[in-house]
């Protein structure tokens, strides 16, 4: 069934809600469906193309879901909040349908500095003109941060409630009353309990999303994966390894700037600078005898070589720029609009 959010079509009737619950419960309970869903990749009918925004608070698995839906890594992931800081577009073309997924930063409610204002601006810009919204929450959970994101969703756009991390719910039947309570908060078009790391769930979500794509020409080539440049992806990959290898030692305000990106005869030469806000943070990044910085560079280089299928030469430096995250000019200079 299809149903729009407030300002569009009315919310589902009791019978319609019950049908949604049954479909959602069926997805949650059937670990091995009796028949595989029809593959999205079968070309049939006119071409379809549409924008699908993935929204939610920090650390609910949006970037992991984007990578799974695209089938390739186009957005970095880590346990640290605010890992995603840009509007990332991931593209998947299957048969006659082209999905243009837009991953957004987690909406920030705790810090009011210039960086977070830029991140929230990216969120608001992403949800303004799309064909479908995937509102991602942790299955069985909903708090004030989730509610603030939900309040941002525009009227007239269908919203699918993606209840992610279903593998963490021990008793699946308990998800039904929670889904009922969620429908009271917002007239969702669909419920979709899932685990973004399960390929079967991802394929089913693609099939659901396909129904919302309008009939129109594709916007990208069939083999495009993202609209972001290789230079941008290089900086993001370094930032991912930075966050993963420093953990809670390093504040979220650290960032990466690519100073040089050259390609010649299959070799990409990249020079990048890791920006931190305090001298003590610089020592954390470099590590004893430079070992941590070396490992950050090695892991980023290896992943970029896998991504591009070619050799990469990566140089890294670390610089201190005190207070950059609350300096509007520097936030823009470092690529945050």
Image: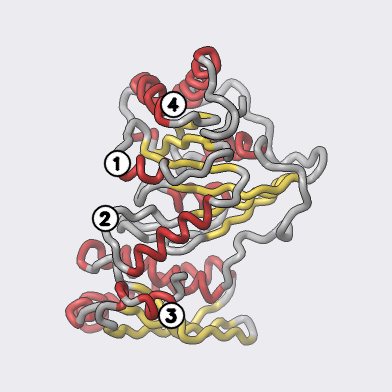
Q: Say which quarter of the image contains residue 235.
A: bottom left
Under circle 1, the secondary element is helix
Residue 221: percent from left, percent from top: 73, 60
The CA distance from mark 3 to mark 2 is 24 Å
Query: Is residue 178 shown left or right of residue 204?
Result: left
User: Residue 267 placed where, x, y %?
Assistant: 58, 83
Quarter of the image where the N terminus is located: top right
Name which residue lies at 42% across and 57% down. 105
Instruction: Say if residue 57 shows up in the picture.
Output: yes
Residue density around tag 1, few if under 14, some if 14–19, many if 20 or more, within 10 Å: few
Viewer-closest of 145 and 205? 145
**Residue 288 locus on image (x, y percent):** 19, 80
Q: Earlier in the sequence, mark 4 or mark 3?
A: 4
Percent x, y for residue 164?
Answer: 42, 38
Residue count near mark 4 (Cα–Cα under 10 Å), binned few <14, some 14–19, many ≥20: some
- In this picture, is 303 found above or below 142? below
Q: Residue at x 27, y 75 (%)?
A: 292
On residue 110, the disc is 2
User: Tag 4, which secondary structure?
Assistant: helix
Query: Which of disc 2 and disc 1 is earlier in sequence?
Result: 2
Residue placed most toward the observer, 240 or 127: 127
Residue neighbourhood size for the residue with mark 2, other residues' Cα within 10 Å, grouped as few (<14), some (14–19), many (≥20): few
Q: Which residue bears the numbered disc 3?
A: 333
Q: Which numbered tag is attached to residue 144?
A: 1
Image coloring type: secondary structure
Distance CA(mark 4)–CA(mark 3): 42 Å
Judging by the rendered image, the residue that carries numbered circle 4 is 183
**Between discs 3 and 2, the one toward the N terminus:** 2
Q: Real-space Cα distance between discs 3 and 1? A: 32 Å
Residue 96 seen in the current view:
no
Q: Is residue 260 left or right of residue 9?
A: left
């Amino acid at each position: 069934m299809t149903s729009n959010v407030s300002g569009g079509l009315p919310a589902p009737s009791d019978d319609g809600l019950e049908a949604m619950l049954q479909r959602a419960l069926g997805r949650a309970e059937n670990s091995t469906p009796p028949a595989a869903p029809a593959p999205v990749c079968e070309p049939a009918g006119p071409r379809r193309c549409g924008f699908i925004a993935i929204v939610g608070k920090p650390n609910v698995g949006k970037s992991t879901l984007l990578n799974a839906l695209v089938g390739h890594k186009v957005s970095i992931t880590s346990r640290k909040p605010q890992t995603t800081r840009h509007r990332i577009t991931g593209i998947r073309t299957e048969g006659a349908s082209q999905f243009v997924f837009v991953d957004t930063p987690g909406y920030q409610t705790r810090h009011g500095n210039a960086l977070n204002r830029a991140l929230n601006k990216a969120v608001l810009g992403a949800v303004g003109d799309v064909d479908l919204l995937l509102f991602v929450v942790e299955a069985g959970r909903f708090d004030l941060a989730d509610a603030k994101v939900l309040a941002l969703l525009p009227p007239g756009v269908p919203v699918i409630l993606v209840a992610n991390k279903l593998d963490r719910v021990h008793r699946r039947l308990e998800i039904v009353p929670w889904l009922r309570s969620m429908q009271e908060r917002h007239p969702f078009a669909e419920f979709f309990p899932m685990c973004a790391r399960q390929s079967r769930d991802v394929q089913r979500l693609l099939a659901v999303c396909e129904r919302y794509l309008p009939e129109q020409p594709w916007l990208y080539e069939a083999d495009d994966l993202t609209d972001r440049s290789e230079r941008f992806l290089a900086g993001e990959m370094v930032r991912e390894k930075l966050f993963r290898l420093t953990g809670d030692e390093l504040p979220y305000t650290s960032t990466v700037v690519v100073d040089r990106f050259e390609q010649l005869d299959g070799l990409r030469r990249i020079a990048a600078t890791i920006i931190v806000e305090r001298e003590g943070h610089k020592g954390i990044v470099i590590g004893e005898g430079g070992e941590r910085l070396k490992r950050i560079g090695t892991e980023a280089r290896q992943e970029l070589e896998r991504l591009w299928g070619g050799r990469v030469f990566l140089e890294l430096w670390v610089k201190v720029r005190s207070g950059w995250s609350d300096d509007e000019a520097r936030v823009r200079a470092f690529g945050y609009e």
